Image: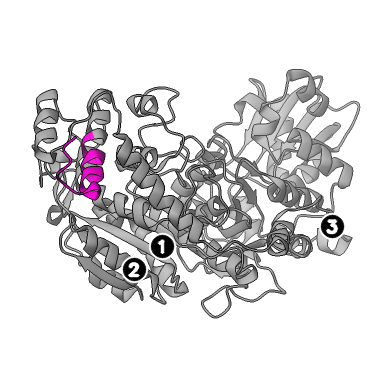
Amino acid sequence: MTTNISIETQTINTLRLLSNQMITKAGSGHPGIALGAAPILYELYANQLKINPENPKMINRDRFVLSAGHGAALLYETLHLAGFNISSDDLQAFRQPYSITPGHPEVGVTPGVEATTGPLGQGLGMAVGMAMAEEHLRAHHPEVINHYTYALVGDGDLMEGVSHEAASLAGQQQLERLIVLYDDNQVSLDGPKKRTDVTDNIARFQSYGWQTLQVDDGNDLHAIHDAIEIAKKSNTPTLIAVKTVIGDFGPFAGSNKAHGTPLQSKDLLDLSRNLNVTIENFKVPAQLLSDMKKRIGQRLNQEKQPSLSALQAYELSTKAGKLKVPTIDDDLKQQAGRKISKNILQKFAQQLPNLWGGSADLVASTNAEIVESDLFDAQNRAGRNIAFGVREFAMGAVMNGIALHGDTKIFGATFLAFSDYMKAAIRLSALQKLPVIYVFTHDSVTVGEDGPTHQPVEQLMALRSIPNVDVLRPGTANEIALAWQQALTSIDKPTILILSRGNLGTQGNQVQASTAQKYGASEIIHNERAKINLIATGSEVQIAIKVKELLPFPANVISMPNLRKFQSLEKSKRHNIVDEYATKNVIIEAGTRLGWREIAQDNGLIFGLDDFGMSAAPDIALRELGFDAHAISARIIEDLK
């Protein structure tokens, strides 16, 4: 290591070289961002972020999201220098199986990583969610919560549509403690940015209501520092565009080839000479480690600590006790699933003061709101209802950010057909083990006259295919109540509630619903001599009951709100619910038949929809699509002959 340059430059160049050594050893990775954006990461960790490497989950820490998640090597090396529990051996294991330094950042795997990123644009959305959570909690607990949220985005992030949705929402909400640094190198994977995008991102963010700042030289550490200090004084979110050179100091500087081409051994030697630093065996010089630790420690020591009483009040408000499931009168049971859900939500909201959420401009239709609370906005950060706007994808990403911040419970709602807009965010909810609550209403062709564009067919089974997600389609009012309880008490997986637009009926009781929650399914009607098991979900449970009444032989009616959970049971437990002595299993669900054969078995019948719906009143749509009780019972009778 040459010492005739400043310790700041030595550290930045060490980050550049060591990150590329990691990438070269792994045989894959993204050298360009590691070389170009190193000064930005250094400034954040050395001079800005309020963090504690010995306590990575410190309540009031600043949050940093690397939205450009392909820069993982640079992040890991920076965290290593900052003193997080990441060793030089961990750096050498970059991108290797079971290491804590995977190819893209994963929350819960690497100390100091705040969000799982890599799918471009979503990191920005999660940063917006973290900033919203900070504002909401600070309104209630200003002595405990008062931190900033930072993100680093690249050109690819800002091309993704979700970045538009999220940035627009952040401007609307005037999130003054959100600071986004833009690695403005004007190069994307396939070539110059202008090849695919001529957007003026400065003007774009200004139109959202953001403060915008520019740093003309990405190696000017003082300019980056000054821009962040200005951003901290803003009453709006800030975008800082930092002009960088992708692959700076390397053989492909300024070229798209720098994005993902690992350097060869000779290239690393040339880079070492260009940067005037030498690193052997992935060992960072002790003086660089101690300097970074000293800077972080000094900031921590200057922080005013909250009083014990303030901390106790905070912990009390954010820890949920045992939830009491509300009782449901018969009048309510007969209403639509979404209306039953609204009533139940109010009862749980009274028990959980840290519960909040909203809809994608569909409150009147989804009924997903906390009636006795105000809107969360720039004038009232204590409000519990979020106006997400028509931004489904951003709503999912923002909810992930809120959940990652911690200490609140978040829900978001839209129509089931539009869950496709947010599927990538749901996948990241599952991957990050976040207990986000998705409320999807208008769950079948019974949406009616709005027609096939609004009538989900394939969405329900597609959601069930995502690992680590509880997809619940309750068929009774009591099942809806317990589905909400399950969602609100989940700690390591998202929950999706599928709710009907049409009425459910009074079938079922508390015991039946508890069994369905525990095992994924339970009997609504039992007959010892049953020849048929009628298995249904959601509002189709009523159709199953009508079919049972039309059949000339006895049948069981089974509600199966959680297909995946039922499938995970041992055979003996399955047979306790779905009678193995019945002649045939009949599935009734107004969605794709794909995925039901395991339950129906080889000789069973599956009544589903493998084509789109139609614009017609609900009863007419069901009849025309062959999905009414008379058509189903006739088919069963014919099949048994």
In depth, the one of 485 and 295 nearer the eye is 295
- Residue 604 placement: quadrant: top right
**Judging from the image, what secondary structure is the residue with disc 1 in?**
helix
Instruction: Give the residue at mark 1.
Output: 166
Instruction: Give the residue at mark 3.
Output: 326
Please state which amino acid type lies under the numbered disc 3. Answer: Pro
In depth, the one of 607 and 129 nearer the eye is 129
**Judging from the image, what secondary structure is the residue with disc 3 in?**
loop
In the shown orientation, is residue 587 left or right of residue 39? right
Please state which amino acid type lies under the numbered disc 1. Answer: Ala
Count residues near mark 2 (Cα–Cα under 10 Å), then give few for <14, some for 14-19, many for 20+. Answer: few
> Which residue is drawn at the image coordinates 10% and 44% (left, top)?
253
Q: Eyeballing the image, is 59 above or below 364?
A: above
- Judged by depth in the image, the label closer to the viewer, 3 or 1, is 1
> Which residue is drawn at the image coordinates 63% and 55% (left, top)?
407
Instruction: Give the residue at mark 2.
Output: 229
Please state which amino acid type lies under the numbered disc 2. Answer: Glu
Q: In 3D space, how far apart are the residues under numbered discs 3 and 1 (Cα atoms)?
A: 35 Å
Count residues near mark 3 (Cα–Cα under 10 Å), then give few for <14, some for 14-19, many for 20+. Answer: some
The mark nearer the N terminus, 3 or 2, is 2
Specify the segment rendered in magenta.
Answer: 1-17
